[in-house]
Amino acid sequence: TSRKNKNGLNEVKHVAGIELAYDKKEQRLLVAIAVLDLNSNSILETKLYEEEITLPYIQSLYSLKELKPALASFQSISKKIDLIVCGAPGMAHPKEVGLATAIGIATGLPSIGITTGRLVGYFDSKKLGNDRGSTQPLRWNSKNVGLVYRSQADESPLVNSIGHKVDLKTAKKWARRFCDQSFIPAPLLQAKTLFEKGRNLSFISDFSWFEEESPSDDPS
C-alpha cells in the first residue's frame, strides 16, 4: 500500500527501485529491488530474485513476461511503498505500456520509468542543453510520453518515462531528486548493487534500438 492523495502522490517516504537484467549465457532473468527511506537516505529492504528464461525475446511484448517475476519480487517486500522507480520504459514503449506502467497498474502504486537507453520516441537534441536539469519532451504517437533529462552536467541524458498515476511534471521532480549525487537515480543505483559482481548481465534500463541522434520532428 502507499500514502496517497487525489493526485496519486502525497508524502513520499519509501521508494522502491527495481532493476531487471538478463544473463544470456545462463538464460536467466534477474530482478533486484531496493527500498529506500527518503528521510534517512537508508536502505530499508532488498530483494534479489531470478528465474529461467522460457520464452524467446519479442521486442514490444516482453514486458508482459518481465511483469510476472517483478510482481513475485514485490510480494515479498514488507515495507509500505509510496513510489516505484523502474529501470524500464513506461509509456515510452511501442505499445505505450512498458514495464514501468504495467507494474504500476498491477500494484496500484505510482510509478515512473528511468532508463539510459531509448526504446521509442523523438526529441530535439539540438535544444537539449549540457547543464544538469536540461530537458526536452520525448514524443511518440503525436504525444508527450516522457522527458529526455540530463541528470548531471555533460553526461549522457536519461529517458524519464510516465509510468502510472504520475504526470510529467512530477516525474521530472523525482528524477532530479534521485539524481542529486549521481548520474543514475539513487533507487536504481542501490538495486543494481544487489547483482552479483562479475556476472555478464544485460540491463533492461540500458536497452536502445534507436540511433543517438533522432529526428526532432515526430513522424507520427
Image (spheres, grey):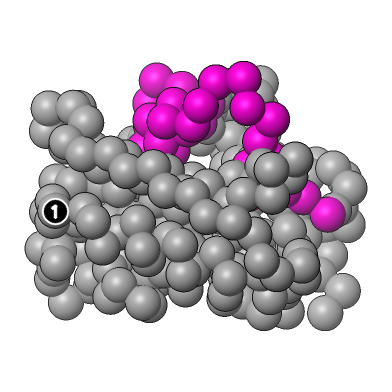
Q: Give the class, few, some or many, for how many residues have Cα within 10 Å of label 1's Cα (few <14, many ≥20).
A: few
Q: Quadrant of residue 47?
A: top left
Q: Residue at x 30, y 72 (%)?
A: 107
Side of 2 where 100 appears, left or right: right
Front in this rendered view, residue 172 or 203: 203
Front in this rendered view, residue 134 or 86: 86
Q: Residue at x 64, y 59 (%)?
A: 53
Location of residue 60 in the rendering, given as x and y in whole percent from the top left corner? 73, 72
Front in this rendered view, residue 201 or 173: 201
Location of residue 219 in the rendering, given as x and y in whole percent from the top left corner? 87, 74
- What span is in magenta? 180-209
Side of 138 where 180 appears, left or right: left
> Magenta segment: does it hold 177?
no
Q: Residue at x 10, y 63 (%)?
A: 3
Location of residue 55 in the rendering, given as x and y in whole percent from the top left corner? 70, 69
Q: How many marks?
A: 1
Amino acid type at circle 1 is Ser
Placement of 152 over or under 115, stated as above or below: above
Placement of 176 over or under 196, stated as above or below: below
Q: Quadrant of the image for the N terminus?
A: bottom left
Q: Which residue is mark 1?
A: 78
Side of 78 where 35 appears, left or right: right
Residue 28 shows in this picture: yes
